[in-house]
C-alpha cells in the first residue's frame, strides 16, 4: 500500500495560513492605501517560504534582515529554490478562490494597479489567531518585509530573479 504524501510547502492549509499572514501584514500601507495585488501576494508567499532569498533581498535593498537557522540555510529547498513556484500562479489563484469562498478576502479594483486584495474581518481575525511559534516567526519576518512596500513589484521580481540566478 502506498501512502499519500503531500510536501508541506504545497499543502493547501499551510499556504492559506501564509496567505492570511501576508495579507494581514502587507495588504495596506500605514495610511490604509491598498498595496497588495495578485503578483505581490505570490511574491511575498514565495519569500516567506524561501527565507534565504528574503534576507538577501532585504540586504540588497539596504534594509535590516532577519536570522535564518541552519535548517533553512542548508536545505535542498534553500539551495535550489523552485522557479515554478515563483512563476506559476495556479497555486495563488487557488488560494484566492479558497479565501473568497470562505469570505476571508475582499478585492477592489484600482485603475492602473488592477485588483487589490485585502482581508475581510473574518480573514483578519483568522490571521491574528495564529499563535504557533512558526507563525509568530513568520509574522516577525513579515514586519521586516514591510520595508519593501515602497519598492515596485517589477523591481522586486527582477532582484529575486537575479538572486536565484546567482546561487
Image (spheres, grey):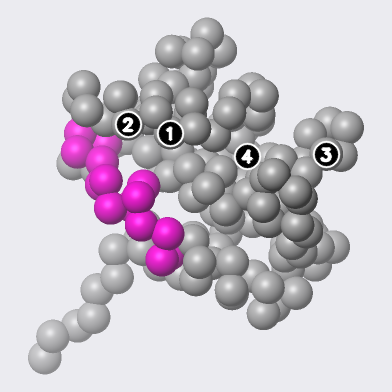
Q: Which residue is mark 2?
A: 161
Q: Which mark is residue 139?
A: 4
- The magenta span reads 78-91
Numbered disc 2: secondary structure: helix
Whether residue 89 sits left or right of residue 31 in the image: it is left
Numbered disc 1: secondary structure: helix
In whole angstroms, how far apart are the C-alphas of marks 3 and 1? 22 Å
Q: Is residue 22 above or below residue 59?
A: below
Q: Nearer the viewer, residue 29 or 144?
A: 29
In whole angstroms, how far apart are the C-alphas of marks 1 and 4? 22 Å
Q: Which mark is residue 157?
A: 1
Mark yes or no: residue 123 visible. no
Mark 3 or mark 4, whichever is nearer to me: 3
Q: Residue at x 52, y 42 (%)?
A: 44
Numbered disc 4: secondary structure: helix
Mark yes or no: residue 26 visible. yes
Residue 13 pos. (x, y %):
51, 68
Q: Which residue is mark 3?
A: 33
Amino acid at each position: 500500500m502506498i501512502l499519500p504524501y503531500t510536501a508541506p510547502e504545497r499543502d493547501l492549509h499551510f499556504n492559506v495560513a501564509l496567505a492570511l499572514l501576508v495579507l494581514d501584514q502587507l495588504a495596506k500601507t500605514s495610511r490604509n492605501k491598498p498595496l497588495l495585488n495578485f503578483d505581490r501576494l505570490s511574491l511575498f508567499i514565495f519569500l516567506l517560504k524561501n527565507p534565504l532569498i528574503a534576507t538577501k533581498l532585504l540586504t540588497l535593498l539596504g534594509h535590516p534582515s532577519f536570522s535564518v537557522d541552519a535548517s533553512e540555510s542548508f536545505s535542498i529547498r534553500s539551495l535550489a529554490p523552485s522557479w515554478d513556484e515563483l512563476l506559476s500562479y495556479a497555486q495563488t489563484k487557488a488560494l484566492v478562490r479558497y479565501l473568497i469562498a470562505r469570505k476571508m478576502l475582499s478585492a477592489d479594483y484600482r485603475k492602473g494597479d488592477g485588483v487589490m486584495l485585502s482581508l475581510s474581518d473574518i480573514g483578519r481575525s483568522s490571521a491574528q489567531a495564529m499563535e504557533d511559534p512558526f507563525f509568530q516567526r513568520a509574522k516577525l519576518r513579515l514586519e521586516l518585509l514591510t520595508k519593501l512596500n515602497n519598492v515596485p513589484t517589477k523591481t522586486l521580481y527582477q532582484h529575486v530573479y537575479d538572486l536565484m540566478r546567482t546561487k
